Image: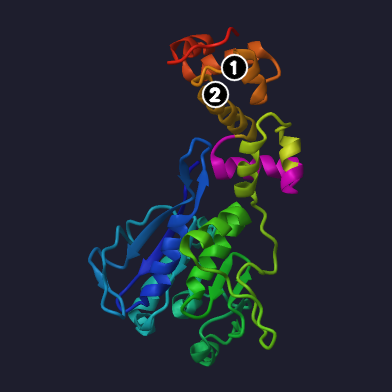
Amino acid sequence: MTPKRIGFVGFEHFTTMHLAGPADAFAAAALEDGFSGQIPCYEVCLIGLKDRPFRSESGIVFYPGHTLDTAPDLDTIIIPGGSGLRDPKTSLAISEWILSRSKQTRRIASVCTGIYGLAPTGLLDGREVTTHWRFASDVARRFPRLKVNHKKLLVKDGLFYTSSGLSAGVDLALALVEEDYGPYVAAAVRSELVTYLARRHPNENSVAPLEFQSRPTDRFGDLVAWMMRHLDDDLSVEALARRACICPSHFNRSFKSVFGASPSKFVENLRLHEARRRLSKRSKTIHSIGASVGFKNSAAFQRAFERRFGVKARSYLDSAPSAAFAG
C-alpha cells in the first residue's frame, strides 16, 4: 500500500496546533498488516514558502522538507491558520500555489483562519464554509461569494473542507481518516491520541466532524481487520464488496487505489503469509494449513506458496525447528 501524501503549508506566524495536531493524527493512522506490524496510511509533508525555517505564533521553529516550488504530488493539501495569513504577500503566494495544484489534488482543506489562504483562489465561491467565529464576519466581507456558517465545526462542500477552532484541525484529520479508511482506523487513531470528537450540542447548530453531508465510501480499514480473522471464508470480490456495501466494480477500483493491488492479489498475499507463519510451527499438515487459510485445493496452495516465496511448502516445513506431521 502506498501511503496517501498529506501536504501542510507552513508560513511565518501560523498557529502551531493547526499543523502539529492534525499531523500527529495522520501519523498515527495505520493498518494492521496481518503480521504484527503496521502499514502507515499517510506520509506527512511540511511545505514552506521558501527553503528556510519558519516560526509559529508561539515561537516554535519548523524546518520544511519541501518548498512551494519543490513539493511532490499530494493527495491532500491542508492550510493551517495564523496571523501570518493576513499578510497579503503570504496569502497570495499560497493561494496562487493552491490554484496551480487544484486539478491534480484530490482534496484541499483549511483549519480555522487557514481559509484566508484558500478563499482568494475563488475555489470556494458559492460554497458553504466555516471558520473561527471571531473572523467569520471579516471573511464574509472580504469574500462575499462564500456562504459562511461559523456555527459548524466542519464543513465539506465538494472537494473542499473548512473547519473552525483550535481543536478543529484534529477533528478534521480524524474525519478525513475515516473517509479514507473507515471508522475502525479512525477509532484507533482517536484511541492512540486519547481524543474524542465533539458531538452535537443540543443548543447549537454545530455538527460532529464525522457527520458530513455525505457518507464515507472507503471502509477498508474495518474490512482488512475482518479479513484477517476470516481467511478461510469466501473472500471473493463479490463477497467483500457486499460486506463493504459497495458495488463490485467500484469496490475493485477503490480497493486497488488504496492498497496498490487487486482484492484477489491482496487476499492471496494475506493467506500465504499466514500459512507461512503456521507452517513454521510445524503442528499441522500442509493440506490442513492450506485449508485453514482458505485454499480448498492443496496442490493450488503449494503452487501459490512456491510462486510467492520461491520455496516449496514442504521444504519450508522440513526446515522449521520442530517436528512436523506428514502432508
Q: Which residue is mark 2?
A: 278
Q: Residues within 10 Å of mark 2 (few under 14, many from 20)?
A: some
Outermost top residue? 326
Q: Which residue is mark 1?
A: 284
Residues under labels 1 and 2: Cα distance?
A: 8 Å
Q: Amino acid at mark 2?
A: Arg
What percent of the width, then of the height, locates residue 167?
Answer: 48, 75
Q: Do callouts 1 and 2 mark residues in contact (Cβ within 8 Å)?
A: yes
Q: Is residue 251 magenta?
A: yes
Q: Considering the whole magenta stretch, tell me its main secondary structure.
A: helix
What percent of the width, then of the height, locates residue 11?
Answer: 32, 73
Quarter assignment of residue 151: bottom right
Q: Is residue 294 left or right of residue 93?
A: right
In the depicted view, which residue is nearer to us: 122 or 157? 157
Q: Is residue 143 left or right of residue 15?
A: right
What percent of the width, then of the height, locates residue 233?
Answer: 72, 31
What percent of the width, then of the height, locates residue 294?
Answer: 67, 25
Q: Amino acid at mark 1?
A: Lys
Label 2: which secondary element: helix
Residue drawn 49% across and 69% down? 170
- State the mark number for residue 44: none
The residue stretch that appears in magenta: 242-261
Residue drawn 76% across and 36% down? 238
Label 1: which secondary element: loop
